[in-house]
């Protein structure tokens, strides 16, 4: 079953939020495990709040010594495994990348995020050499403005989108009230009260588009593996 890791060496890249949104949306239809390998354990904290989807299992990573077993056990049990990696390059990150079918590299449209994304892409390629297999990955822009993007944001985005060597999600995770609210109230984006959260329907549509694109990319990965 596919193992999807979210990796970026810079904190505040939208990594945990996008990982949790994917996990919650997939859990509407299939059992999902999300492994919280961020030392701050934000997803573990979220899971203690009410409203966690019953199809979603949260595993709190203990250390780099346990991550491989945690991934293996989860992959044997559930159709989808999502790993929220720590915000720094480490042996744990390399271990998780080596076991992943697909890596999502979240980043804001900022130069510091771009530098960090490039570093994690280099790390992915080093890990490919170590395990002697191809590992698919794609950049995901997060916390993006729906309208009136700055020149810097447009420039950073274009540098990745115009690069034929880097796969980039067409969908962006926009800056939405709903996506921060779930960490305060618990539950998923679908459990929020539309009277208390701005533009909830639009936020849900944003997540649906993101998840649909993830599924499409996973199918392409599977097709590539069959051909090889």
Image: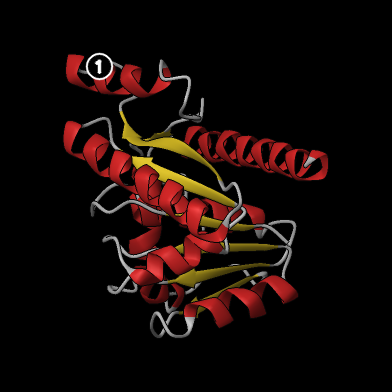
Element type where label 1 sits in the image: helix
Q: How many marks on residues?
A: 1
**Residue 157 sits in quarter:** top left
Residues packed near mark 1 inside 10 Å, few (<14), some (14 to 19) or many (20 plus): some
Q: Nearer the viewer, residue 173 or 103?
A: 103
In the picture shown, does residue 120 fall above or below 205? below
For the point 39% across and 53% down, the residue is 7
Query: Which residue corresponds to the image point at 50% horizontal and 71% vertical from the top-left?
Result: 35
Q: Position of residue 24 (x, y in %)?
A: 57, 58
Q: Is residue 40 above or below residue 220?
A: below
Could you say where residue 49 lies in the image, as x and y percent from the top left? 42, 75
Quadrant position of residue 53: bottom right
Residue at the spot x=33%, y=36% of the render? 175
What color scheme is it? secondary structure
**Residue tagged by mark 1?**
155
Q: Is residue 220 left or right of residue 147?
A: right
Residue 196's x, y, as percent? Answer: 38, 48
* Quarter of the image that includes the C terminus: top right
Q: Can residue 41 be seen in this snapshot?
A: yes
Horizontally, residue 183 falls left or right of residue 213, namely left
Q: Is residue 192 visible?
A: no
Farthest right residue? 226
Rendered position, 57 above or below 144: below
Residue at 24 percent across and 22 percent down: it is 153
Quadrant of image for the N terminus: bottom right
Find residue 86 and report its horizontal and vertical position in percent. Answer: 33, 65
């Amino acid at each position: 079953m596919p193992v999807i890791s979210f990796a970026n060496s810079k904190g505040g890249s939208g990594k945990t939020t996008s990982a949790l949104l994917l996990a919650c949306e997939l859990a509407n239809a299939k059992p999902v495990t999300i492994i919280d390998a961020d030392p701050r354990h934000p997803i573990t904290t979220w899971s203690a709040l009410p409203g966690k989807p019953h199809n979603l299992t949260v595993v709190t990573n203990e250390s780099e010594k346990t991550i491989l077993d945690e991934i293996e056990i989860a992959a044997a049990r559930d159709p989808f495994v999502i790993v929220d990696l720590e915000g720094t390059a480490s042996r744990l990150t390399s271990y998780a990348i080596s076991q992943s079918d697909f890596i999502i590299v979240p980043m804001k449209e900022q130069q510091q995020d771009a530098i960090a994304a490039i570093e994690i892409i280099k790390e992915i390629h080093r890990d490919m050499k170590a395990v002697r297999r191809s590992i698919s990955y794609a950049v995901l822009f997060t916390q993006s403005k729906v309208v009136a993007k700055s020149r810097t944001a447009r420039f950073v985005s274009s540098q990745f989108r115009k690069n034929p060597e880097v796969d980039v999600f067409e969908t962006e995770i926009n800056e939405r009230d709903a996506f921060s609210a779930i960490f305060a109230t618990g539950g998923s984006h679908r459990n929020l009260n539309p009277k208390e959260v701005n533009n909830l329907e639009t936020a849900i549509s944003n997540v649906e588009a993101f998840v649909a694109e993830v599924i499409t990319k996973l199918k392409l990965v599977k097709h590539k593996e069959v051909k090889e």
